[in-house]
Image: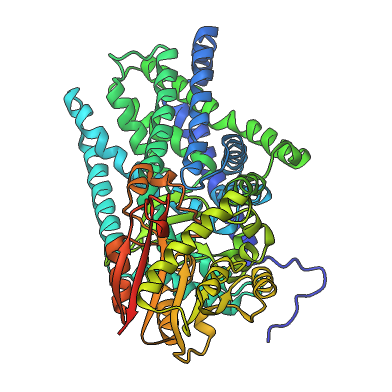
Amino acid sequence: MSSPAPAGEAVVTRPTRRRLIAWVVAGLVVVGVFMVFIPRIADYSDVWSIVGDVGWTGTLVLALLTVVNQATYPSVTMSVIPGLRYREALLARLASTAISNAVPGGGAAGVAVTSTMLSSWGVTAGPIARSVVLTGIANNVVRLAMPIAAVLPLAMSGKAVDTLLEAALIGVAVLAVGVFTVVVLVQAGILGSLSEGIGRLLARVSKRFENPDGPRRLVSEAIGTEAVRVLARRWPALIGATVLGQLTLFAVLLASLRAVGVGPGSVHWSEAFAAFALVRLVSLLPITPGGLGVAEAGYAAFLSIGLTEAGIEQVVAGILLFRFFTYAVPVPLGAIAGLAWRRHPQWLQTHRERSARKEEALYGMVVEPEWLEDARCFRCGTAGEPVYDLDPFRLVRCAGCGQAFMSPRLNESGRLALYDDADYFDDGVYRTPSASALQRTWADGRLDLIGDLVPPQESRIFEIGCAYGLFLERARVRGFEVAGLEFSGVAARTASQRLAVPIYEGEVVDLDGDGSFDAVAAWDVIEHVPDPAAFLAAAGRLLREGGVLALSCPYYDSIPARLLRSRWWTLKPHKHIWHFTSAGLRTTLAEAGLEPVAVIRNPLTKANYLRPDSMVAVARKV
């Protein structure tokens, strides 16, 4: 056990010591560059004279290019956080840049500022973590690739490429190793397993997460399967925005050189781009805040080769002008952005508020983040490949069997909040007399199908998802003895009172099937359940041998689904988890021991009247 420090003696902790060392190193580099290196190659008085000769036109052009450059950066964050507004991303970027340029190791502080600001606008921890990781990867990839891109134009201009070629080869090697590593990790499933392991570890050691799945989901968002999905879907926008940011930054450098009189004969654009690529590569190492001193020395060393003393002074003047607009100017702008955020947060509507308004309009409910869970194919057990982004949901397709499903989807709490609300049914099939009449038409047509296989007299029928009991009411008129089950407590109680028979409440998988029913019906239910295989197995346990299961559901290979794609009205991502094709439904029934008798897709038949994207299936228990 260590003894306490004597009274009055300062205790220097390791983080403080590290910060002190970082400040000292950064200070030595900055002093060395601006007080030793630059004065040896250029006279400051001559340099300032050159800068002072830049007219209002040149200054305005540089200012406009700087604005354009700063305006491109928010799109990088927006590309990996869907729904984030431009002005929010811009404020966060300006504040983050100001911190990064002001203190050694400011990159970490900048990330913290960005995270805090995004959190205050309702962006959750998962998307923030994913943004930090993916934007960091994109930035490093682009910086490693720039020396490669600079080799050809420099060689075509007849300039020496030795130093740049070495950097390009290093970049190629690092990129190749990085890409190979990521591909191997993804293909082998190691990345997902690694993120799961880290998440489990965090869940054990951290008490900050009330939800035990919080750490696991956070890591999955940042480096696991969720990050891979987002990267696979959005990498063109992410890389494109990152490249655009670097190119507009280079435009400011080139314009700065031209503004002080450095013409193409002295420094060709390809030379300027080569110097830019090398300095951006070197600045990956956070030696000084914002690369202060390191960048100036790199640009001066490379661009001054072969120039006269007057030419070198012009180059230094251009470099200092460039750094003023791209390094010094963002600091006060970021301070203003941070101050505006602290003093007037009400100026900006939160990301969550906008999402809530959108969800209320689309789904009739606000989807709380804790209601979402990832899903896997019920048949193959694998995560699906993205098809449509339906924020906060996503339609995916299993690579093994082709089954389409929603992931993330609503968990049990979310489903209870959705279905245990009278408005869900009152605003649906019972909302108008015409809607109820259409329901009766379907019920009569479907009872005709069942009656052809099961005589109604002295037969028992059980409906899963009976809602208010309209179908069971029509079945009882036909002579069936009826019973039912409803997930929604509100609907179950209403149906029980209406029919004067017990209606079970909950999931069919929780029932003890005794094989006493001649028919089981499930109209537009299988697409809602967590596990269709378990659902059909439980329905089968209710049936006697030779009994009939009848169900309906939308089908994913219908003409409306193919034409409308992500705008297909029956996607209903908050309700419909599973989307079957006609062939896929037949396979699923057969796997559950149910022999398909008929699958009807004709929208002119009573059982499926006016439903061009729905199918009715009848199967027998074998």
Please tell me whether residue 598 is drawn above or below residue 23 in the rendered image.
below
Q: Position of residue 60 (x, y in %)?
A: 53, 13
Which color mode does the image show? rainbow
Q: Position of residue 377 (x, y in %)?
A: 37, 69
Please tell me whether residue 4 is drawn above or below residue 474 in the rendered image.
below
Callout count: 0
Q: Is residue 76 left or right of residue 593?
A: right
Instruction: Tell me the quarter of the picture where residue 361 sits.
Output: top right
Q: State the residue at coordinates (50%, 22%).
A: 321
Q: State the residue at coordinates (33%, 61%).
A: 600
Q: Is residue 419 left or right of residue 246?
A: right
Q: Is residue 329 left or right of residue 305?
A: right
Please say whether residue 181 is visible from this viewpoint: no
Q: State the residue at coordinates (51%, 90%).
A: 512
Q: Position of residue 37 (x, y in %)?
A: 45, 33
Looking at the rendered image, the quarter that the C terminus falls into is: bottom left
Q: Position of residue 114 (x, y in %)?
A: 60, 47
Pick whichever, 611 or 534, lies toward us: 611
Please tell me whether residue 210 is drawn above or below residue 258 in the rendered image.
below
Q: State the residue at coordinates (62%, 74%).
A: 206
Pick whichever, 349 or 345, lies toward us: 349
Outermost bottom residue: 514
Instruction: Tell me the quarter of the picture where residue 310 sits.
Output: top left
Pick whichever, 556 or 541, lies toward us: 541
Please say whether residue 267 is visible from this viewpoint: yes
Looking at the rendered image, the quarter that the N terminus falls into is: bottom right
